[in-house]
Amino acid sequence: MFLKIFTAFIVLSISKITIPKTYYNVHSDRLFNVRVSGTSKWDNPKVKDASVTLCGGQDLTVCASKNLNNNTDFLVAVFKSSSISLESFLVQFKYDLNGQKHYLTVKIPDACKNIPIHTKLDYTIYLNTTDFMCNLNDVYIDSLAKNFQE
């Protein structure tokens, strides 16, 4: 009797391992690197505690942050699952000005300078096979008028 139960258990275990859905979930949900770079700038000397945060995912739970200095390059990076859409990623710049919190939020890939406009919509497809690099160039966190000019 014990041998029959043991044999049935082994057969069920092996069949669960070889189900295609299990194989699909294990091998197709890969991780890719999403990187955002640029140069942080501000004109007002009263800007304090500046930082940049890259977040994505359904609930914006995949995040990375970095403190910023004036006129310096920054790079923030996160690993994303191939099941997470690139359109769910936001880059948020935070800073204090005269004791008040201010925010500047941009979406990727829309704000990326290194991607031609006509190919931005195709990047969701590419993210299932490769990493993604977004260059924002100069980001003036205290002056919206200067940002993202062509």
Image (cartoon, grey):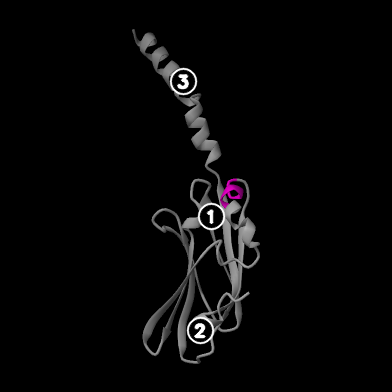
The mark nearer the N terminus, 2 or 3, is 3
Which residue is at the front of the view, 4 or 94? Answer: 94
Q: Position of residue 148 (x, y in %)?
A: 57, 74
Disc 2 marks a residue whose amino acid type is Ser
Disc 3 marks a residue whose amino acid type is Ser
- The boundaries of the magenta stretch are 124-128
Which residue is at the front of the view, 66 or 36? Answer: 36
- In the rendered image, the residue lying farthest to the front is 118
The mark nearer the N terminus, 3 or 1, is 3
Q: Position of residue 106 (x, y in %)?
A: 49, 69
Residue shown at 39%/18% (left/top)?
9
Mark 1–mark 2 contact, CB under 8 Å? no
Which residue is at the front of the view, 111 or 103? Answer: 111
In the picture of the structure, the residue carrying the numbered disc 3 is 15
Q: Looking at the rendered structure, which numbered label has been put on residue 62?
A: none
**Residue 143 among magenta residues:** no
The mark nearer the N terminus, 1 or 2, is 1
In the picture of the structure, the residue carrying the numbered disc 2 is 143
Q: Nearer the viewer, mark 1 or mark 2?
A: 2
Q: Position of residue 116 (x, y in %)?
A: 66, 62
Badge 3 crowding class, 10 Å Cα cut-off, few under 14, some 14 to 19, many 20 or more, is: few
**Residue 126 among magenta residues:** yes
Q: Quadrant of the N terminus?
A: top left
Question: In the figure, 14 relative to 112: above or below?
Answer: above
Alpha carbons under labels 2 and 3: distance apart: 61 Å
Badge 1 crowding class, 10 Å Cα cut-off, few under 14, some 14 to 19, many 20 or more, is: some
With 116 as the anchor, is 26 left or right in this view? left
In the picture of the structure, the residue carrying the numbered disc 1 is 79
